[in-house]
Amino acid sequence: MVDMSKQASNKRSTEPQSDNLAIHYHTPVMLGEAIAALNIRADGIYVDCTFGGGGHSRAILQHLNENGRLYVFDQDAAAKQNLPDDERIIFIPQNFRYVQRFLRLQKISKVDGILADLGVSSHQFDEAARGFSTRFDADLDMRMDQREATTAATVLNNFTEQQLHKMFEQYGEVTNSKTLAKTIVQQRAVAPIRTINEFKQAVKAAVKGNPQKYFAQVFQALRIQVNDELGALKELLAQTTTLLKPGGRIAIITFHSLEDRIAKTFFRNGSFSEVEADEVYGTKPESPFLIISKKPIVPGETELKQNPRSRSAKLRVAELK
Ligand SMILES: C[S@@+](CC[C@H](N)C(=O)[O-])C[C@H]1O[C@@H](n2cnc3c(N)ncnc32)[C@H](O)[C@@H]1O
């Protein structure tokens, strides 16, 4: 359901209830670069698909005048606590894969700019009970959206060996994904795997190299699967060609190569696969986008030092022709 509560407010402040709260929640990555990329029109309509701690959203609001509007999505209800008291922002607690559907409910069919800063927030990662981090013991959850039924435990206890193998290989680049999948299937036949510690114990024999790095890759794969992160990104991108106004910008911050490749290919071709050149003329159909960032933009040294979690971030920017 669309949360209209903030629209009713007359106050105009980009400060959240407590600024410390939002900073603690998540430090925005490539903030200046992302805002510059959007080339914001003061009276424009913008969408922040991944509100989180609201760092990017507050910066967008600072560039809008009283006619500008910012629609923000987050599928995690916890993000709502970071909403600034500002009548120009509208919070939509939904998956951004339904962006057009929920904007239509707000009578919005075209927008001037879209931002997506993918993945999980520091808050989700640091909150033990959410089950995203290898540092804690908790239920194997990893859902960004608690209304969804599938948790990491569901995946581990129900996927076939082949599905587990492919998931760890493709989403985590786990070197011995086949052995890991086999170990999981053997161990879950003895007892279901419900918690992080039970999982670590169950697959102990399969761990290769540095356990911290190994489990980071394994957990990344599980998280991508549980939240269908690549599916949601593709659905979002597919809607951008009809949602953006001509000249409207899209900025995507990715954190691993699979997401980056999807954004790059889509901006280049307007589709998710490489387009073959015409056999006779050697021409390719024109992309609906003008690519603004020929190479992905990455965090500068100062940001990398201040926020090590920004290290794998890449920003790609395109403009609808
Ligand atoms: C990296 S954080 C964004 C941080 C934000 N830019 C800031 O400045 O604080 C990603 C956020 O997007 C949300 N999210 C991720 N995938 C989503 C999706 N498919 N639909 C809606 N929200 C999503 C997560 O719940 C998380 O709060």
Image: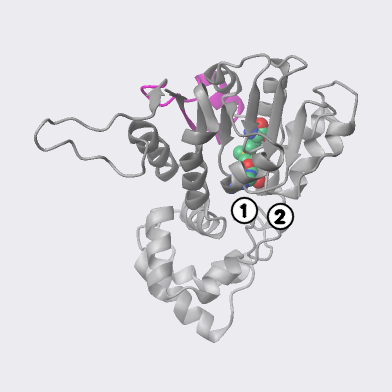
Please state the horizontal and vertical placement of residue 201, each as a whole percent of the image: 55, 71
Which numbered disc, 2 or 1, marks the residue that appears first in the sequence? Answer: 2
Instruction: Please give the range of residues in magenta.
Output: 293-316
Q: Is residue 164 left or right of residue 86?
A: left
Question: In the figure, residue 165 lies in which quadrant?
Answer: bottom left
Label 2: how many Cα within 10 Å (few below 14, some 14–19, many 20+): some
Name the quarter where the C terminus is drawn. top left
Which element type, helix, strand or loop, lies under badge 2?
Answer: helix
Question: In the figure, residue 192 lies in which quadrant?
Answer: bottom right
Q: Residue at x 53, y 80 (%)?
A: 188
Question: In the figure, residue 7 lies in which quadrant?
Answer: top right
Q: Which residue is mark 1?
A: 133
Three-letter code, disc 2: Ala
Residue 120 in sight from this viewpoint: no
Q: Residue at x 61, y 25 (%)?
A: 306
Point out the quarter of the image occupied by ligand 1: top right
Q: Residue at x 39, y 23 (%)?
A: 291
Q: Are marks 2 and 1 in contact (CB under 8 Å)?
A: yes
Label 1: how many Cα within 10 Å (few below 14, some 14–19, many 20+): many
Please state the horizontal and vertical placement of residue 103, each as a whole percent of the image: 66, 39
Three-letter code, disc 1: Ser
Please state the horizontal and vertical placement of residue 319, each as a whole percent of the image: 46, 23
Q: Nearer the viewer, residue 282 or 252?
A: 282
Q: Which residue is mark 2?
A: 128
Q: Is residue 126 left or right of residue 235?
A: right
**Distance in Å between CA atoms under marks 2 and 1:** 7 Å
Residue 294 shown in magenta: yes
Please state the horizontal and vertical placement of residue 219, each as a whole percent of the image: 53, 56
Q: How is the image coloured?
A: one colour
Label ID, residue 106: none
Residue 314 shown in magenta: yes
